[in-house]
Amino acid sequence: MTDWTPEEDEAFNEVEKNSNLGKQILQDIEGQPYVYTPKRAWVGLTDEEKQEWITAMPWPPQPRQLMVLIEGVESELKEKNS
């Protein structure tokens, strides 16, 4: 094990748990693979929500309209996953 305090060890785990180096170090310390489980699953758009976005766009869309579409979808996904 390490000579770290429990607080330092916890801080290391929080910062490094998603990095390849952090996973390798934890595997070396504990002798087993480190697996990080996300706190909750990703929430995507439903088929109905996707269809709403598609039908809201004029076809063929112009570049600025595509940007508005992308920004809108991104915003909705951020809201669903925050």
Image: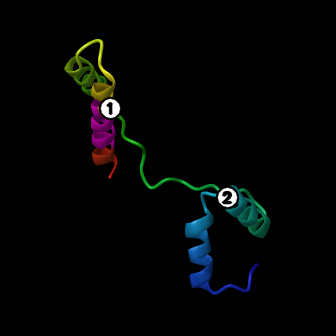
Residue at which label 1 appears: 67
Q: Is residue 18 left or right of residue 51?
A: right
Label number found at residue 34: 2
Assign a secondary structure to mark 1: helix
Q: Position of residue 62 (x, y in %)?
A: 30, 20
Q: Nearer the viewer, residue 36 or 50?
A: 50
Q: Is residue 71 left or right of residue 7?
A: left
**Is residue 46 visible to the viewer in this orientation of the structure?**
no
Q: Is residue 5 above or below residue 29?
A: below
Assign a secondary structure to mark 2: loop
Q: Position of residue 43 (x, y in %)?
A: 36, 40
Q: Label 1, label 2: how many angstroms apart (C-alpha)?
A: 39 Å
The single residue placed furthest to the top in the displayed view is: 60
Q: Is residue 80 above or below residue 65?
A: below
Identify which amino acid the numbered label 1 is placed on.
Answer: Met
Give the mark count: 2
Q: Which residues are magenta?
A: 68-77
Q: Residue at left 22%, top 17%?
A: 55
Q: Nearer the viewer, residue 13 or 53?
A: 53
Q: Residue at left 76%, top 70%?
A: 29
The tag earlier along the polypeptide, 1 or 2, is 2
**Principal secondary structure, stretch drawn in magenta:** helix
Q: Residue at left 42%, top 51%?
A: 40
